[in-house]
Amino acid sequence: VKLPSGVRTWMTVPLLNHQLGQRIDEVRIKDSGIWAAKHLSVLEQSFRGAPFAQEALDLAAKTLSNPGGTIAELSRASMLALAEYYGLDQDTEFVNSTDLNVAGKGSQRVLDIVQAIGGNTYVTGHGAWQYLDHDLFEKAGLEVAYMDYQCRAYPQRHGDFTPYVSALDLIANMGPRGIEFIFSGAVYWKDICNES
C-alpha cells in the first residue's frame, strides 16, 4: 500500500510452519486477530481523505474478519470480494482446484486442471515464465498466454501516481469507476519469447 509519506510498503500475512513447495491450501495462517487489525489500521492511514475510502475499508474489514485458515481461503475470499464489488462475479464461475480431484505437481498439475475444466488456454502471470513447461501444454494442444497488465493513472492520494499498489487503493480513490482504469490482455508465450 502507499503510505501518507508516499512510500510503498508490503502488507504480509503471518504463516504457521510452512515449507517451500507446500500447496497454498495447506499453508495455514496465524490467528488473524492481531495482524488483521494492523492491516486495517495501515489501510485507514493510507486511504484517509480518499473519496471512497470507506468502501475500500469495509471491503477489507469484511474479508479480514473471516480470512479462513489457509492462504488459499484468504486469497479466494479477497478475489471474490473484489469480483463482487466490480460486478465481475455475474458471468464467471469460480472453481477450487481442490474440488477437481487432480493429482500431480508443477506444470503437469496445472495442465490437468485446465483440461479438467475444459479450457483451451492457460492464462498466467509473468512469474510462471521461470517454471512453466510450455512444451507440455503445446503437446496437449493447449495454448499458454501471459497477462499483459495495464493500469491507467488515476487520482491518487499521497504524491505522484504509483501504479499497481493494490486493488483497494483503486477502490478508495475511484470507487466503482475504478474498473475503467484496469485493462488486461494476454500475449501468446512464443510472442514473448521472440521479444526477449
Image (cartoon, helix red, strand yellow):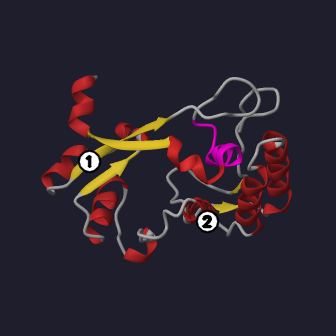
- Residue 17 image position (x, y, % from top left): 68, 57
Q: Amino acid at mark 2?
A: Ala
Relative to the observer, which residue lies in front, 21 or 33? 33
How far is disc 1 from disc 2 in space, using C-alphas? 26 Å
Which percent across, then down, holds residue 128?
Answer: 39, 43
Q: Is residue 98 left or right of residue 142?
A: right
Tell me the quarter of the image containing the C terminus.
top left
State the residue at coordinates (69%, 43%).
173
Q: How many marks?
A: 2
Residue found at x 79% / y 50%: 39
Q: Quadrant of residue 54?
A: bottom right
The picture places residue 145, in percent across and down from the top left corner, at 29, 45
Residue that numbered label 1 is attached to: 144
* Label 1 crowd (10 A; few <14 / some 14-19 / many >=20): many
Q: Is residue 154 left or right of residue 100?
A: right
Provide residue 109's location: percent of width, then percent of height: 33, 61
Q: Quadrant of residue 119?
A: bottom left
At label 1, which amino acid type do we have? Val
Residue count near mark 2 (Cα–Cα under 10 Å), binned few <14, some 14–19, many ≥20: some
Residue 49 magenta-drawn?
no
The magenta stretch spans which residues? 164-174
